[in-house]
Image (tube, grey):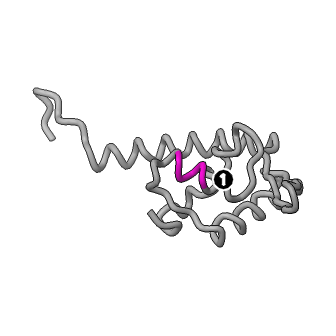
Amino acid sequence: MKASEVRGHLDGLLLSVLESGPLHGYAIITAVQDRSNGVLELRKGTIYPALNRLERLGLLSSAWESVGERRRRCYELTDAGRRSLATERTVWKEFITAIGSVLDPAPPTPGHAT
């Protein structure tokens, strides 16, 4: 799946993979791919603007980390980010329930007219 297919769910995906602790950008991309069994393919050009936006909104904090000669920015959930993730999960569950009810309706119970 391409980034355009996860639009509207990207924030929740990013917040979710950061729930267990700080990660740098490439590790975030890898975590999303791993959790989705390779189905979701996010690109740097997609996640970095989203990470920056989430940080401006106060949902993430970041710090530079040095690894040998290289520096990379690590992102971490804030308390506001944890609350937002909880909301994202609730909205997601409501969404999949509603869509599931339409795409895969329960069979009518005997004795009820449709």
Which residue is at a point 15% across and 41% down the rendered structure image? 114
Could you say where residue 97 lies in the image, as x and y percent from the top left?
41, 41
Q: Does 52 appear above or below 32?
A: below
Q: Does 8 appear above or below 81?
A: below
Per the rendered image, the range of residues in magenta is 30-34
Residue at the far front in the pictured view: 68
Which residue is at a point 81% across and 40% down the rendered structure image? 79
Badge 1 density bin: few <14, some 14–19, many ≥20, Cα 10 Å: many
> What is the number of callouts on the image?
1
Where is mark 1, residue-wise? 28
Q: Nearer the viewer, residue 20 or 71?
A: 71
Q: Nearer the viewer, residue 4 or 110?
A: 4
Q: Secondary structure at mark 1?
A: helix
Could you say where residue 78 lies in the image, as x and y percent from the top left?
81, 44
Provide the major secondary structure of the magenta segment: helix
As for residue 5 lying within the magenta part, the answer is no
Could you say where residue 82 lies in the image, as x and y percent from the top left?
73, 40
As for residue 32 lying within the magenta part, the answer is yes
Q: Nearer the viewer, residue 69 or 76?
A: 69
* Quarter location, residue 109: top left
Amino acid, disc 1: Ile
Residue at the far top in the pictured view: 110
Which residue is at a point 44% across and 62% down the rendered structure image? 1
**Lateral position of residue 13 relative to residue 75, left or right:** left
Could you say where residue 37 lies in the image, as x and y percent from the top left?
45, 48
* Quarter location, residue 72: bottom right
